[in-house]
Image: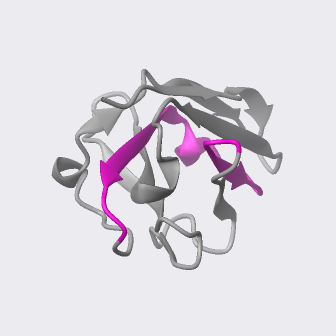
Amino acid sequence: QVQLVESGGGLVQAGGSLRLSCAASARTFSNYRMGWFRQAPGKEREFVAGINWSGGTTDYADSVKGRFTISRDNAKKAVYLQMNILKPEDTAVYYCAAELSIRFAVRRDQDYPYWGQGTQVTVSS
């Protein structure tokens, strides 16, 4: 069983930055691929970014490519999402997700059995 706890959300003006963190309780965190997803009111949950077990492979949704950066620190059992040049359309609850796999990151939320409780990100115009 893996427990995930997100932090770092908040209110920011358009053009600003936030850094989300996700702390994991997994004994062998390096065996998990990780993902960030988000869900805006009235919309389906969508993939934002993913990272493989080592951090050597990353993947981004087109809507955030060039603005967001996913990274991980296996020693600290944490994954991060640096969000720059934020836009009002980035407003959503952001979730961290994990799957026991050493393969490359995937985009389907059904592939991730472990989820955090989410952290709210609000971008004002």
Q: Is residue 82 above or below residue 1?
A: below
Whether residue 100 sits left or right of residue 12 in the image: it is left
Q: Position of residue 71 (x, y in %)?
A: 66, 60
Within the magenta stretch, is there residue 101?
Answer: yes
Q: Quadrant of residue 2?
A: top left
Give the image location of residue 125, x and y in percent: 72, 38
Relative to 113, is 46 on the left or the right? right
Horizontal side of 123 relative to 43 (left or right) equals right
Region in magenta: 76-102
Q: Nearer the viewer, residue 55 or 120?
A: 55
Residue at horizontal 54%, vertical 46%? 89
Residue visible at 47% across and 47% down in the picture: 28
Residue 65 in the image, given as x and y percentages of width and height: 58, 72
Residue at 55% of width from left, 36% of height from top?
91
Q: Is residue 7 above or below residue 68?
A: above
Outermost residue to the front: 27
Q: Is residue 72 above or below residue 116?
A: below
Tell me the residue at 22%/40% (across/down).
113
